[in-house]
Amino acid sequence: MKLMFTQALVSITLWSCALRESPQKNMSNDLMANSLTGSTVGTSKIDTATFGTGCFWCTEAIFQQLNGVLKVTSGYSGGHVVSPTYKDVSTGTTGHAEVIEIVYDPTVITFDELLEVFWQTHDPTTLNRQGNDVGPQYRSVIFYHNQEQKGKSEKYKKELNESGAFDKPIVTEISPYTTFYKAEDYHQDYYNNNGSQPYCYYVIRPKLEKLQKVFKSKLRH
């Protein structure tokens, strides 16, 4: 996979994911997939990817736009505390990262294509930070579900570093998937339910505008 892109970073000084915790309930249905219970949807095979690119509100909103993505769930992975809450994870002491779990149809969108979106929609060179969201819970991370995902993730990370696509070395963590804890309901489908909130307008919206320009052919129609 050859990636040619200009990195665009959004610098917002007033808003961060950690400052925008809200108790409101999620008011919409899961993204077309409440009934996903097996390894197939109809005759299509499904697969799972788990990514962290900073605040999961941003990551969720991005991957929801992609054709072939059946369901996106925000949650926590990679830590040592059982059933952590958002408050727990926000302390930065549980070891968890804010991540999304993506259920997708690999006959429509491949893991390679998901990786391409992953690399281009956040800054993988900043350790434990995305913009003003700071802490290990905001680290860039891929939790691979099998050896194929591991191999591809490591391959593309190496190639991007060698190509000089970024000014600094990529620090993205590539670790085996263990446990995923679904985040509280009010975190699910966050951008769609809270688009007028300052964080959504000033941080998430520019990311979606970039996505629509760079990955137009991969978006839902």
Image: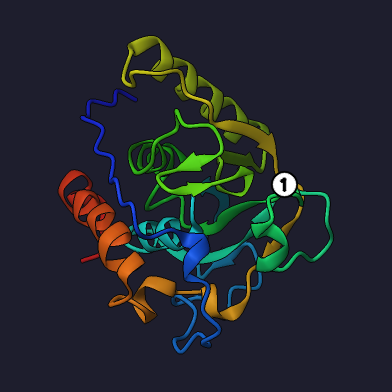
Please provide percent x and percent y for residue 127: 54, 32
Count of numbered circles on the image: 1
Q: Name the colour scheme.
A: rainbow
Q: Residue at x 58, y 25 (%)?
A: 151
Classify the position of the N terminus by image quarter.
Answer: top left
| Extreme residue in the front direction | 14
Front residue of 192/36: it is 192
- Looking at the image, can residue 74 be seen? yes
Q: Is residue 108 above or below residue 175?
A: below
Q: Label 1 amino acid? A: Gly
Viewer-nearest residue: 153 or 192: 192
On the question of residue 44 being in view, the answer is no
62 displayed left or right of 105: left
Q: Which residue is mark 1?
A: 78
Q: Farthest residue to the left: give it.
A: 213
Q: Nearer the viewer, residue 121 or 149?
A: 121
The x, y position of residue 87, in whole percent, is 68, 67
Q: Residue at x 63, y 40 (%)?
A: 144
> Can you say whether 18 is above or below 51 in the image?
below
At which x and y percent is residue 100? 54, 57
Residue 60 falls in image quadrant: bottom left
**Residue 183 shown left or right of residue 192 in the figure:** right
Q: In the displayed structure, would residue 85 be above or below residue 151? A: below
Q: Where the C terminus falls, by quadrant? A: bottom left
Sort mark 1 into few (<14), some (14-19) or many (20+) by Cα contacts within 10 Å.
many
Left or right: where does residue 127 sit relative to residue 166? right
Q: Residue at position x 68%, y 50% from top?
A: 92
Label 1 secondary element? loop
* Relative image position of residue 23 (x, y in whole percent): 56, 84
Tell me the residue at 26%/32% (across/down).
Answer: 7
